[in-house]
Amino acid sequence: MPTKIIMDTDPGIDDAAAITIALNHPDFDLQLITTVAGNVTVDKTTLNALKLTKFFHKNVPVAGGAAQPLIKPFEDAARIHGESGMPGYDFPTDLDQPLSMTAIEALRDHIMAAKEPITLVPTGAYTNIALLFKTYPEVIPHIKEIIAMGGALGKGNMTSAAEFNVFTDPHAAAIMYAAGVPITMVGLDVTMKALLTPDTMTKLPTLGKTGTMLHALFNHYNDGDQAGIPMHDVNTLFYLLHPEAFTTEKMWIDVQTDGPAIGETVGDIRGAYHEGKTNATVCVDIDAAAFNTWFLTAVEAIG
């Protein structure tokens, strides 16, 4: 049976790749896409999600969410993803409309209506998730797990300490990690290793219309270097299907919400400060070659 998931996302180029796979992979049943301000403003992330559902002719509902973080001023990543968030490819313009309800309402309705607990896959700032938990706490027992892209035990990509998604809304991240839902942290410790290699990039445009579209987006992605391009958000889906490709450790994650280390995810790696308790499974290593092979196979299957 395909895994039923909801994606909460801020597309964004690597988010677009993740949505592409979630919409089309036979092992996923994507129930809902909710959008949040992150890589670009929420009006643009919502538009980009609708571009992808139209491109693939998928009737997956899209709901727009939070336009700004809970407390911290909003800083986008247009320098990385371009002003539109998904430059480089001419998508359809006759787009469907987003749901009339907010992302928070759509999340509540879909989670509560599901016959079994559902998996949340947030790949942007966690603002919608935090608002959901605070506004409708009754959903929490109905969530199977959260597979979240974000955080780092080592070097950040916004500051020396903080990764972008957590840095964007650290207060929301703190709420999510305190909610008691099983969380897997798929952070920079693995996503900066699972790079799309130059060889993978060469093969992409030979893999049909989907490969051509993704290749065009990736050529406008101001991330990565000669070693390859990080597909941060796609790693959440790879983990769901192939956890054996990851090395993980259980630990307690705290989130810094002020000061120069704001947005840092601090792992209690010694188990010294929380009486041996843990609140997350943290990905610390990955089989990067397996990731590249899986990604190409998944894109080729879409055509």
Image (spheres, rainbow, N blue to C red):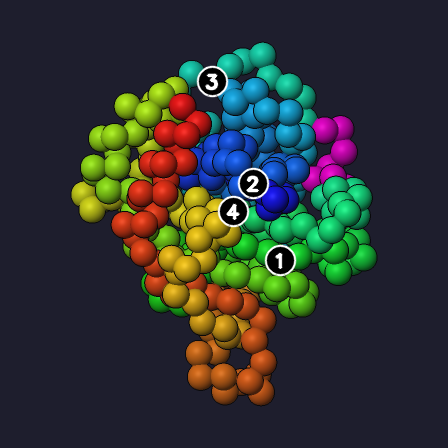
Picture quadrant where residue 285 is located: bottom left
| 101 sits left or right of 92 in the view | right
Residue occupied by mark 3: 91
Numbered disc in front, either 2 or 1? 2
Q: Which residues are magenta?
A: 99-106
Question: Looking at the image, is mark 2 or mark 3 earlier in the sequence?
Answer: 2
Say which amino acid is labelled 3. Phe
Say which amino acid is labelled 4. Thr
* Residue nearest the viewer, comparing 234 with 242: 242
Element on which disc 3 rests: loop
Numbered disc in front, either 2 or 3? 2
Name the spot of residue 220 as percent of width and height, x first.
Answer: 32, 30
Element on which disc 1 rests: strand
Q: Mark 2: few, some, or many residues within 10 Å (few <14, many ≥20)? A: some
Say which amino acid is labelled 1. Glu
The residue positioned farthest toward the front in the image shown = 1
Residue occupied by mark 4: 123
Residue occupied by mark 1: 145
Does the CB distance between marks 1 and 4 fall below 8 Å? Answer: no
Residue 104 visible in the displayed image: no
Picture quadrant where residue 59 is located: top right
The residue positioned farthest toward the left in the image shown = 226
* 196, above or below 62, in the image: below
Residue occupied by mark 2: 28
